[in-house]
Image (tube, rainbow, N blue to C red):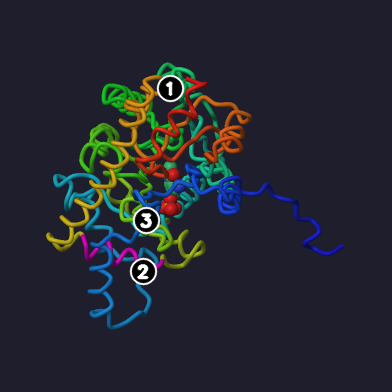
Amino acid sequence: SPLFAALKDQPSDSLLELIQLHGADPRTDKIDLGVGVYKDEQGHTPVMTAVKQAETILLNSQTSKSYLGTAGDMGFVEALIPVVFGEARRGDTALSGVQTPGGTGALRLAAELLNRARPGATVWVGTPTWINHFPLLEDAGLTIREYRYFDRNTQSVIFAGVRKALESAPPGDIILLHACCHNPTGADLSPEQWREVASLCAERSLLPLIDLAYQGLGQGLEADCSPMRDLLKHVPEALIAYSCNKNFALYRDRVGALFYQCGDEARRERLRGNLVNLARTLWSMPPDHGAAVVRLILSDAALARMWSDELDTMRRRVHSLRAALVAAHPGLGFLRWQNGLFSTLPLSPEEVLSLRTQHGIYMAASGRLNLAGLATAQVPVLAAALEPYF
Ligand code: PMP
């Protein structure tokens, strides 16, 4: 029989379906809280001014598009280190990285590396989590152990569950952590909880795999990374999958990096050799443009300032939407202590559907909403529509 006849149907992407449904909805007052990109008051996802300026510089100065190499733009990787890990770690040989196609590429490369180091190794994943984490890790061959991370009804982290997972994981297991702006719940670990996670990882020799896709969109560039930076002081080895696609709004340019911390020099060199070797068969080389733009921004004080100001404007808009919703409907108070673009409301799929049919409010069936999809003027509409549920 034809080879392709053996392929099985795959579930369609429900968020992409939601985009189509929203597009086809004729109501002019519809609200799109579905897909996870930042939007401004006008519902646009603009190119940042700092990015435009860096692109102009790049256009005028680039003289070759010859191959860069499998590790990508190392100037980009090095320019990110003080931003992500703090000034203190500039030039720290225990910390390095390679450029990857987005945070997704970084996660996949990490998964391939971990599976090469220990085939079928176990990754502890708190649920709910970014939907792509499961296939990403499993397709690389890793084994997933789930535990409940978030209680929808109390809207908070089930830290007893996190602790129990860490205490039952045997040495050498991997623990997946969201550095900040947890997707899909917005519920991050507190600094005290991070400290406890750090000591458990250290005591029990667990390897942190940290997903950092929203730096600067929670409490600010520094604050969003400070618990992770502390954790890295306590563990000898860790992997950090970084995305520039949200905080530089470069989404389609696929900008990211996989950083690794490893104090042992020989081991670190071997690790790098394996990353480069794996990347060679996955994508050979990451796309250059967006990473070059990020490098140019971060290596020019004025552009870097312009970028962090623009990012701060985005962050403050999401904050003020959270505050405005809570002011309009105190029953939504939990939105104030969650971070980033997302929160997950304790709504049933039927309730989510009814918000869509009755009010033209679009959100994922899980109850996840992207706060940035909201215009300030729509706050009272959303608050009123949610009134019966909270
Ligand atoms: N991690 C998380 C938690 C995410 O939400 C996303 C994007 N939705 C990513 C990683 C990867 O993003 P990208 O590949 O676009 O950099």
Secondary structure found at label 1:
loop
Q: Residue at x 37, y 52 (%)?
A: 42
Q: Residue at x 30, y 38 (%)?
A: 218
Tell me the kind of residue under disc 2: Asp
Secondary structure found at label 2:
loop
- As measured in the structure, the alpha-carbon distance from the residue carrying label 1 to the one carrying label 2 is 40 Å
Point out the tag, 1 or 2, that comes first from the N-terminus.
1
In the rendering, which numbered label is found on residue 100?
Answer: none
Magenta part, dominant SS = helix
* Rendered position, 220 above or below 189: below
Q: How crowded is the residue under tag 3: few (<14 C-alpha within 10 Å), some, or many (20+)?
A: many
Judge depth for marks 1 and 2 and give the one in front.
1
* Rendered position, 359 above or below 50: above
In the rendering, which numbered label is found on residue 155?
Answer: 1
- As measured in the structure, the alpha-carbon distance from the residue carrying label 3 to the one carrying label 2 is 11 Å
Q: Where is residue 204 shown, x and y percent of the image?
A: 38, 25
Mark 3 lies within 8 Å of ligand 1 (Cβ measured): yes
Mark 2 and mark 1 in contact (Cβ < 8 Å)?
no
In the rendering, which numbered label is found on residue 256?
Answer: 3
Asked if residue 39 lies left or right of residue 192, the reply is: right
Tell me the kind of residue under disc 1: Gln
Point out the tag, 1 or 3, that comes first from the N-terminus.
1
Mark 2 and mark 3 in contact (Cβ < 8 Å)?
no
In the rendering, which numbered label is found on residue 288?
Answer: 2
**280 or 163, which lies in front?**
163
Secondary structure found at label 3:
strand
Q: Where is residue 247 shown, x and y percent of the image?
A: 31, 51
Report the span colored magenta: 287-297
| The stretch drawn in magenta includes residue 179 | no
